Amino acid sequence: MSTGFATPTLFRTPARKIHHPAERLQISVTAPSDLVTLCSVAGEVDQYTAEVFRGRLIGSLSTAAAVVVVDLSKVTFFGVSGFQVLIEARSQLSHTDRHLRLVTGPRCVDRLLEVAADVGSFETTTSLAAAVLAAA
């Protein structure tokens, strides 16, 4: 017997597609001069992508450059996991006569440095050009 009403269907929330870390985070490591290694980061640095960030940044520390510049100006999310990677890199460089310099700018990066009350222990600038020139 038909009532004239459509049979209710179950509503399902579509499954969230989890993107591979390489799709959420892009990192390039270059050497703009003999004195500088540049690690440019774009995208989301969170618990899911932190190991990719760690691998590339810590791997770049084996170069002979006196300054490692980490360009975070294109980061869209920066979590505690990313901050821990920066602390690890800074610690490794502190045993040598080399320096870690951060290019900041996005609120998510600046805010985390402020909240961690650790901004003073990192050399920071909002300009990539200034960071690279300061090493020369």
Image: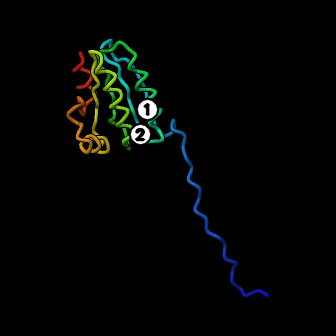
Three-letter residue code for mark 1: Phe
Task: Indicate the position of residue 24 as horizontal and vertical percent values.
Answer: 48, 40
Residue at 27% across / 39% down in the picture?
A: 105
Label disc, if present, on residue 65 of the rendered structure: none
Q: Is residue 119 above or below residue 36?
A: below
Name of the residue lying farthest toward the left: 120
Q: Element under label 1?
A: helix
Q: Give the residue pinned by disc 2.
A: 45
Q: Give the residue pinned by disc 1.
A: 53
Position of the N terminus, as image quadrant, is bottom right
Three-letter residue code for mark 2: Val
Residue at 54% across / 43% down in the picture?
A: 19
Q: Is residue 60 above or below residue 5?
A: above
Residue at 56% across / 53% down in the picture?
A: 16
Which quarter of the picture shows residue 81?
Answer: top left
Q: Decide which of 74, 49 is in the foreground and name it.
A: 49
Q: Element under label 2?
A: strand
Task: Indicate the position of residue 99 as horizontal and vertical percent values.
Answer: 27, 21
User: Distance between the Cα atoms at labels 2 and 1?
Assistant: 7 Å
Mark 2 and mark 1 lie on one chain; the one further toward the N terminus is 2
Q: Are marks 2 and 1 in contact (CB under 8 Å)?
A: yes
Q: What crowding class fits label 1: few (fewer than 14 Cα within 10 Å), some (14-19), or many (20 or more)?
A: many
Q: Decide which of 32, 117 is in the foreground and name it.
A: 117
Residue at 28% across / 31% down in the picture?
A: 103
Task: Indicate the position of residue 51 as horizontal and vertical percent values.
Answer: 47, 33
